Image (cartoon, coloured by chain):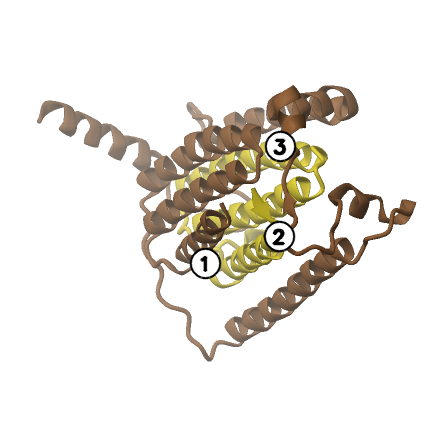
Chain colours: A brown, B yellow
Amino acid sequence: MNGLLAGTLILTAIAGMGVVFSPQTIYSALSLVLTVGLLAVTFLILNAQFLFAVQLIVYAGAVMVLFVFIIALLDPASEERPRLTDPRFVLGILAIAGICAAVFVASRNGVTYVTSCTDQSAACMHGALVGAASDPYNTFGFPAAAVNQAGNVQTVANQLFHTYVLPFEVTSLVLLVAAIGAVYLTRQTRGAAPPPAGGARPEPGGAPQELPEERVEEELVAGGTR
Amino acid sequence: MLSQSMFPWILLTAGFLFTLGALGVLIRRNPLVVFMSIELMLNAANLALVGYSSFLSSEEGQVFAFMVIIVAAAEVVVGLALMTRVFRIGRELDVDDLDEMSR
């Protein structure tokens, strides 16, 4: 189990590097599919079965399909490599070094907070939950008895529909606003062309506005008659 | 069962993935890849939440990770709709060229 978790984490890191460093956009998308799937496996190893299913359905099933469809529709060109002497590139690398140091220091603090907490005081409540936290070979994960008695989905639903029922309902509003926004942004405007965004620069005629749909239709027709 | 000594590696992997995502947002110029890097950062936060949830035997981290997944899905829908809009008005998909709002 430990080896499985270690291998999954290493593969996740490698797939994440593929997202950022791939020259082609579609390779980035496929690397992200791999990353998301490996994270789902990690959730399963960590006894989060409900999030495993949600991760696969929402990310691998919906979000990534959307990404791949948009890549197929827009056909973005592969970008050239950044020049190493570009001051913006150097600034970005320096910012990343700062973020990296902050994240690693924070994760070290998180680990030492939990594992150094061995007494049973109220301030060390989480340490007491872990149990004999000073033992490096103590196991973690949900107690098997509790999982067998209730189940992961039931315990998560208990939290979701009792303690966090208001945030859960607000997420429906978030999804509704996102759906309306997407329909508004991508709707077809009949007749008058929409004003260009910002209005600062006039767009070169109305021909580019009709180009993507016509091209897709032509490709569909060509594919259907072949 | 998992050994407790694996927990720091979960946090380190989450930190590594988050750093990768921030790097992608800063150095890549294709807005699609920038969005994928944002997804990478959200997934890193989810990994840390679920790792802590499993480590502390508490379900609350999983509930928050669920909320993060919902918000990420909504963000992707709006962002990709914006990108199709930008493409439809005939602009190049490059975050350095999309500077109308700064003029």
Q: Residue at x 53, y 62 (%)?
A: B23
Q: CA distance from mark 3 to mark 1?
A: 30 Å
Q: What crowding class fits label 1: few (fewer than 14 Cα within 10 Å), some (14-19), or many (20 or more)?
A: some
**Left or right side of A60 for A175:** right
Same chain for the residues under marks 2 and 1 in the image: yes
- Disc number for residue B66: 3
Residue A123, visible in the rendered structure: yes
Whether A78 is drawn above or below A126: the answer is: below
Whether A141 is drawn above or below A94: the answer is: above
In-front residue for pair B34/B69 = B69
**Left or right side of A39 for A34:** left
Q: Earlier in the sequence, mark 2 or mark 1?
A: 2
- Look at discs 2 and 1 and give the one toward the viewer: 2
Type of residue at label 1?
A: Arg
Q: Residue at x 74, y 51 (%)?
A: A133
- Residue A176 placement (x, y as % from top left): 61, 22
SS at badge 1: loop
What chain is tagged by disc 1?
B
* In contact (CB < 8 Å): disc 2 and disc 3: no
Mark 1 = which residue?
A: B29
Q: CA distance from mark 2 to mark 1?
A: 35 Å
Type of residue at label 2?
A: Phe
